[in-house]
Image (spheres, rainbow, N blue to C red):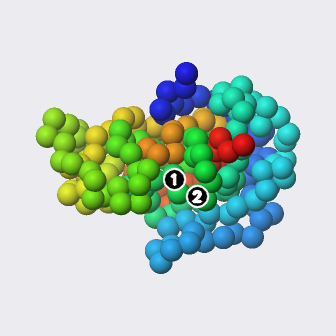
Amino acid sequence: MLRKSFEIPAFMDEHEITALLNFYKTLPKTPNSGVEKKAYTTGFPIESLPFKDLMPRLEKVFGKFGVTVSMFLEEFDPWNVHSDYFKDDANPYYAVLIPLEVQDKITHTLVFNELGDDKDWKRKLQVKKNFKYSSYELQLLSHVRTSLLSTLSIDTLYKWHPGKLIAWRRNLLHSSDNFPIGGLEKKTALVLFLNKDD
């Protein structure tokens, strides 16, 4: 039984990371949808990856699955708290993030315990009286409103390392850290949204 979020260190090697970054360079960059431009979210057909053993390796971890979205994420402004649940598939499964480039800086993805499986999730959250953030966690989340943080509790901080696989159930709320304050201008990852649709 898979945990609700987890990581696998060194899931990809340096050659695979380089191949992915070179493949990304061949694609026209696509800005994220929405008013605020925070990243390039450049989609591509999963079948066009430069190496063919990724899907069987992922199946060893996740079992049988479909891929709703495959994209390169090049983030230059931190994402706030959000859910990856609503992507026009019937049975959302896991989000998979594999860091590719972080400019030798420290950055994280923060996964919370609370769920975003309803489009009205913000209204349903309750203040957490028994959860206290550390000063380090508050620094990482300094781009998130205090009123929203008071309704959330951290499951895990996942530190980015090129080639690591980071995964979480798509209904879990999560956030980038406020990486520009650490001097990081942008960070790049491979992102897959998996489903269990038949």
Q: Quadrant of residue 28?
A: bottom right
The numbered dot on residue 84 is 1
Element at badge 2?
A: loop
User: Contact, CB < 8 Å: mark 2 with mark 1?
Assistant: yes
Q: Residue at x 51, y 52 (%)?
A: 85
Q: Nearer the viewer, residue 126 or 20?
A: 126
Expressed as whole percent of the image width and height from the top left, the position of residue 55 reads: 77, 37
Q: Residue furthest toward the left?
A: 129
Element at badge 1?
A: loop
User: In the image, 184: left or right of 93?
Assistant: left
Q: Residue at x 69, y 29 (%)?
A: 63
Identified by mark 1, the residue type is Asp
Query: How far is disc 2 from disc 1 in space, using C-alphas?
Result: 7 Å
Q: Residue at x 58, y 58 (%)?
A: 87
Q: Residues within 10 Å of mark 1 (few under 14, many from 20)?
A: some
Expressed as whole percent of the image width and height from the top left, the position of residue 48 reads: 84, 52
User: In the image, 93: left or right of 105?
Assistant: right
Q: Residues within 10 Å of mark 2 (few under 14, many from 20)?
A: some
User: In the image, 94: left or right of 53?
Assistant: left
Taking 160 as reference, is 103 above or below it? below
Identified by mark 2, the residue type is Lys
Q: Residue at x 47, y 32 (%)?
A: 4
Expressed as whole percent of the image width and height from the top left, the position of residue 14 reads: 72, 37
Residue 43 shows up from this direction: yes
On-image quarter of the C terminus? top right
The numbered dot on residue 87 is 2
The numbered dot on residue 141 is none
Expressed as whole percent of the image width and height from the top left, the position of residue 135 reads: 22, 42
- How many numbered marks have been drawn onto this rendered protein structure? 2
